[in-house]
Image: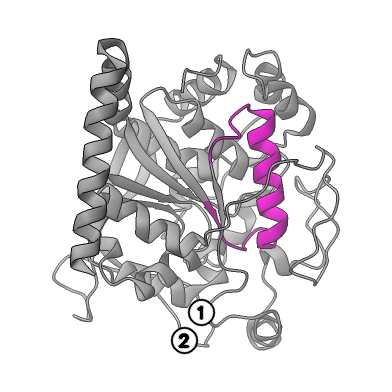
Amino acid sequence: MANILFDVALASTVLVVTAALMLGPANDCRAADADARRKVIIDQDAFGPAGSNIQAILLLLQSKDVEVLGITIPSGDGWRDEEVSHTLRLLEIAQRAEIPVYPGAVFPLVNTQSRTKRWEALYGKLFYKGAWTEEWPAEGAVRRTPYHADPYLVPPSPAGQPTIQPAHESAFSFLSRAVREFPGQVTIIAAGPLTNIAMTSRLDPQFSSLAKELVFMGGSFNPTPADNPFAAEYVNATRREFNMRFDPEAASIVLHEPWKKITEVPIDPTTKTFFKAEFIRDVSRGQAPFDAYLGQFGQSFPMWDELAVAVWLDPSIVTRSKTLLVDVDTSFTAGCGDTLSWAPGEGPGLGERAVNVVFEVDVPRLERMTLALLKAPTPPH
């Protein structure tokens, strides 16, 4: 196997050098620009149309110094296949159909809908259950596809059906392959349940150590409820958050992996954010090919996933962060899925990793950055 890999690598090097000699200086400059861009894989439960999941993807597509290698999709806010369809349609509208979309996990590692219902019978109702939410809260859910238990059903989207297809490769294979192709260069930004990342880590023990870093949106510590209905669920359950609760076992696995760097954007800084109706109107008048789509289908949510992306794009917007050891409760108790944390050196010593946890950000700067990127013309790619 080692000889085969060496031969492939050697052949690839010869082809690259030959192409560079043939293409000339102008193309050399373009290749250098591509190499200089920050490489990222988006792992997202991309339910749409529009909304926080989708807008987070668009922020990365609109960033001139970012190269999106691919988008991997797990179930979470919706079922995987429906989310894949929403993502493909988004890429068509954004005129970025060259970006591959890789289907990932359909179900959490252990959690199930029946298991969740049993937990609710014992410990009380959950505010939000993603794909398992049978009765939707009124907040922001007016364009939500009606509940369906079939994970492989893809209802028609009001934004239209995509004509492009997802990649034939699985999310797990792609994630593993990409960090080997660009060792130490690929950031994983995960804004949904961490099932894809956990499964890749188990299939490829070197995966996390070969990545540059992990940035994830999830977890909750002690958020201050804001003046919007989405913050109400954290009043009596300050350590509970959907991404971790949907697949707590996956989250715990990922948090014990040997990443070079982990940045967590929990609920705490997001309760002060909100994508207001006036923002939707403003974006609809922008110059990007997807702005009319956002104007038609946009909804007002806290800027959950946009904030995770913005923290990576410009870390200077962070005004307060802290290094903590972090894990997720996997016991089938009232605390299932809750965020666990300790000061460095005070954890149970079971392989907890140091995590840079973001607690406060400059919200006006976040808003300006988001609106500017969503309204700008599509950058060259």
Which quadrant of the rendered structure holds the N terminus? Answer: bottom left
Q: Residue 18 lies in what quarter of the image?
A: top left
Q: Residue 52 lies in what quarter of the image?
A: top right
Q: Position of residue 343 (x, y in %)?
A: 21, 65
Q: Which mark is residue 336?
A: 1
Q: Position of residue 50 (x, y in %)?
A: 69, 38
Residues packed near mark 2 inside 10 Å, few (<14), some (14 to 19) or many (20 plus)? few
Q: Residue at x 45, y 30 (%)?
A: 363
Q: Residue at x 58, y 52 (%)?
A: 167
Q: Is residue 237 above or below residue 55?
A: below
Q: Is residue 49 left or right of residue 42?
A: right
Q: Element type at marker 2?
A: loop
Asked if residue 147 is among those painted magenta in the image, a careful observer would answer: no
In magenta, the rendered stretch is 72-99
Q: CA distance from mark 1 to mark 2?
A: 5 Å
Please say if the residues under marks 1 and 2 sit with CB atoms less than 8 Å apart.
Answer: yes
Say which amino acid is labelled 2.
Ser
Q: Which mark is residue 331?
A: 2
Say which amino acid is labelled 1.
Cys
